[in-house]
Image: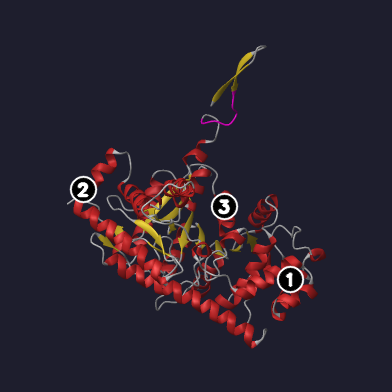
C-alpha cells in the first residue's frame, strides 16, 4: 500500500515495507479454515449484535472449533486448585481456600521450580519433573522405555507440530503426506514453510478407514513428480473425521513408513475421546509390539495436548511431544529450535503434569478422588451422548449422511447439494459447501466449517461440526436448525 504525505514544505510518497509484494508468498497462500471466512463473518455479526442489530437468533453458536470450555464445559476442580495454588505461592493462604491434596500437589511442583517462581522461565525443553511425569505416562500406557531427553513440553500440540515441520521441510521438493480430510494446521504450515502437500485419501465408505493401496498411490504419484516424501501424518482419533484407527491400521502405516524410510508424525491429542467399543493404540505402542526392525528404525514424533481429551484447557496452551529413534544431531537441532522459542508457558506445563499424572485413590483423599472421577465421567458422558446424537440426527436429514462419530470431538458429514445450488455458488465465486455454511450462519447463528477447508474428494461436499455444546437441549436445538435449513434448501432447489 502506498500512502502520500503532504505538507507546505514537502510532498512525497511513503512505501510500506510490508505489502502484498514483500510479504512471503507462502504466508499469503497459507489458510486455516477453522478460523477462516466463517469465523470472520461471525465476528462481524457479533459486533453488529452488540450494536443492536437484530438477527433471527439470540446468539452465535460456535460449533466450528474444538474449544470445549467456551461452550460450557467446566474445568476439573482439582486441577484448577493446583494451578491457582501455584500462582498464589502462599501455602498458608492456599490451605484456607483449597483442598489439602491440591495444595500438596502445588507444593510438589513449586519445590521443583527455580526459586519456586511460577512466573519465571523453565529450561527450554520444560520443567524436568513434568518431563519425567510425561515419560512415566508413556511408559505405563505403551509398555516402552522413554528417553527423557527426547520429551519436549510445548505450547499445545501445535508448537510441537510446527517445530517438526520446520525440521522436515527445506523447500518445495520436500513432501509431507497428510490424510484427506485433514486438520488444516498441517496444510497451512506445509504451505508456510514452502513444502509440498502429498494427500492420501481416507475411505468415507469404510468409516474413514485407511487403505494401504491409497498410501502407495499417493507416494508413487508424488515421487513420480520428483517430490522427496519426507514424512507422513497420522491423526488418531481423526480430526475432522472422528474415526478411531485400529492397531492393524497402524501396523500397515508403520510398515509403509519403514519401507519408504519416512518420518512418522502421530497426532494423538484425542486419545481419551473414544465413544465406541475400541481401544486407543498409540503409534509408539504399535511400534513396540511389531518389534525389530520397525521399533529400531522408524522415526516418530507423537503429540498430545491439554487442550483436548477430557480437560479441554485450550487456553492454557499445554502439550508435549515425544521423539523416538531420532539421532543425536537431529535431537540437538530440535533442542536448538526449542531454545529459540524459550520454554512453553509454566501454567500450561503444570497442566500437562496434571493430565498425565492425575490424582489416584492412593495419593489423595476419597472426597477429592471421587469428585475428580465424577467430573471426568460427566464430561465424557456428555461428549459421548452428543457424539451419538450428532450421528443420529444428521443421518435423519435429507441429503446428509454421516459416519458414526467414534472418537475425537467432530463429525464430518457429507451433504449432497442440488446441482442448481452448486451452480449458484459457483456464479458467486464460492465453493458450494462454503455457501451452505455461510447461509446457515446468517439464518441460524450456527457456525460450522466447510469441508473444502479440510480437503475432500472432488465432487463431494462436507462440513465439520463439533459435539461440544455442553447442553443436550442446545445441541438438539442446533441440529434441528441445521435440519430445517437443509430441508428448506433441498425443497427450494429441487
Q: Residues within 10 Å of mark 1 (few under 14, many from 20)?
A: many
Provide the residue designation for mark 2: 419
Residue found farthest to the front: 52
Kindly identify which numbered label has been placed on residue 162.
3
Q: Residues within 10 Å of mark 2 (few under 14, many from 20)?
A: few
Q: Nearer the viewer, mark 1 or mark 3?
A: 1
Please determine whether, in this image, residue 457 is positioned above or below residue 24.
Answer: below
Q: Which residues are magenta?
A: 15-20
Q: Nearer the viewer, mark 3 or mark 2?
A: 2
Q: Position of residue 257 (x, y in %)?
A: 47, 60
Task: Please tell me which residue lies in front, 129 or 421.
Answer: 421
Residue found farthest to the top: 9
Residue at image coords 47%, 48%: 43
Q: Is residue 214 magenta?
A: no
Provide the residue designation for mark 1: 109
The answer to whether residue 18 is left or right of residue 61 is right
Q: Is residue 202 visible?
A: yes
Q: Going from the N terminus, do you reach mark 2 or mark 1 first?
A: 1
Spatial CA distance of label 3 from label 2 is 40 Å
Q: Position of residue 223 (x, y in %)?
A: 41, 48
Please determine whether, in this image, residue 229 is positioned above or below residue 83.
Answer: above
Residue at image coords 23%, 61%: 398
Spatial CA distance of label 1 from label 3 is 28 Å
Q: State if disc 1 and disc 2 touch (CB < 8 Å).
A: no
Q: How is the image coloured?
A: secondary structure
Say which quarter of the image contains residue 210.
Answer: bottom left
Q: Position of residue 125 (x, y in %)?
A: 69, 60
Kindly identify which numbered label has been placed on residue 230.
none
Q: Is residue 17 magenta?
A: yes
Secondary structure beneath label 2: helix
Amino acid at each position: 500500500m502506498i500512502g502520500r504525505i503532504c505538507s507546505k514544505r514537502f510532498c512525497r510518497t511513503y512505501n510500506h515495507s510490508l505489502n502484498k509484494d514483500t510479504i512471503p508468498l507462502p504466508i499469503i497462500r497459507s489458510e486455516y479454515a477453522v478460523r477462516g471466512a466463517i469465523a470472520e463473518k461471525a465476528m462481524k455479526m457479533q459486533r453488529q449484535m452488540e450494536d443492536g442489530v437484530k438477527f433471527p437468533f439470540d446468539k452465535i453458536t460456535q460449533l466450528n472449533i474444538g474449544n470445549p470450555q467456551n461452550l460450557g464445559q467446566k474445568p476439573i476442580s482439582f486441577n484448577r486448585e493446583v494451578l491457582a495454588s501455584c500462582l498464589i505461592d502462599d501455602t498458608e493462604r492456599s490451605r484456607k481456600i483449597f483442598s489439602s491434596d491440591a495444595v500438596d500437589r502445588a507444593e510438589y511442583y513449586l519445590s521443583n521450580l527455580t526459586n519456586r517462581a511460577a512466573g519465571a522461565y523453565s529450561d527450554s525443553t520444560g520443567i524436568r519433573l513434568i518431563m519425567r511425569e510425561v515419560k512415566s505416562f508413556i511408559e505405563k500406557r505403551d509398555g516402552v522405555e522413554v528417553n527423557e531427553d527426547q520429551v519436549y513440553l510445548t505450547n499445545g500440540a501445535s508448537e510441537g507440530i510446527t517445530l517438526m515441520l520446520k525440521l522436515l521441510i527445506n523447500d518445495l521438493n520436500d513432501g509431507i503426506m497428510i490424510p484427506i480430510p485433514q486438520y488444516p494446521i498441517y496444510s497451512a504450515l506445509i504451505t508456510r514453510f514452502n513444502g509440498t502437500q502429498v494427500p492420501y485419501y481416507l475411505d468415507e465408505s469404510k468409516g474413514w478407514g485407511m487403505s494401504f493401496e491409497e498410501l502407495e498411490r499417493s507416494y508413487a504419484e508424488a515421487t513420480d513428480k520428483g517430490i522427496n516424501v519426507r514424512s507422513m501424518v497420522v491423526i488418531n482419533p481423526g480430526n475432522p473425521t472422528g474415526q478411531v484407527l485400529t492397531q492393524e491400521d497402524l501396523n500397515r502405516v508403520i510398515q509403509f513408513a519403514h519401507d519408504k524410510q519416512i518420518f512418522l508424525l502421530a497426532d494423538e491429542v484425542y486419545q481419551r475421546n473414544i465413544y465406541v467399543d475400541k481401544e486407543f493404540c498409540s503409534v509408539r505402542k504399535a511400534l513396540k509390539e511389531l518389534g525389530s526392525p520397525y521399533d529400531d528404525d522408524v522415526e516418530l514424533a507423537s503429540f498430545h495436548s491439554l487442550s483436548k481429551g477430557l480437560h479441554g484447557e485450550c487456553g492454557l496452551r499445554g502439550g508435549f511431544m515425544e521423539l523416538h529413534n531420532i539421532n543425536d544431531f537431529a535431537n540437538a537441532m530440535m533442542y536448538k529450535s526449542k531454545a529459540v522459542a524459550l520454554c512453553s508457558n509454566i501454567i500450561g506445563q503444570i497442566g500437562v503434569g496434571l493430565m498425565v499424572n492425575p490424582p489416584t485413590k492412593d495419593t489423595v483423599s476419597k472426597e477429592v478422588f471421587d469428585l475428580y472421577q465424577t467430573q471426568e465421567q460427566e464430561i465424557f458422558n456428555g461428549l459421548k451422548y452428543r457424539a451419538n446424537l450428532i450421528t443420529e440426527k444428521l443421518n435423519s436429514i435429507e441429503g446428509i449422511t454421516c459416519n458414526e462419530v467414534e472418537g475425537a470431538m467432530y463429525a464430518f458429514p457429507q451433504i449432497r447439494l442440488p446441482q442448481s445450488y452448486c451452480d449458484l455458488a459457483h456464479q458467486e465465486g464460492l465453493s458450494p459447501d462454503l455457501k451452505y455454511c455461510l447461509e446457515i450462519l446468517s439464518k441460524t447463528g450456527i457456525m460450522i466449517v466447510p469441508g473444502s477447508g479440510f480437503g475432500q474428494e472432488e465432487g463431494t461436499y462436507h462440513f465439520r461440526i463439533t459435539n461440544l455444546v455442553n447442553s443436550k437441549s442446545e445441541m438438539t436445538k442446533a441440529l434441528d436448525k441445521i435440519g430445517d435449513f437443509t430441508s428448506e434448501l433441498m425443497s427450494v432447489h429441487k
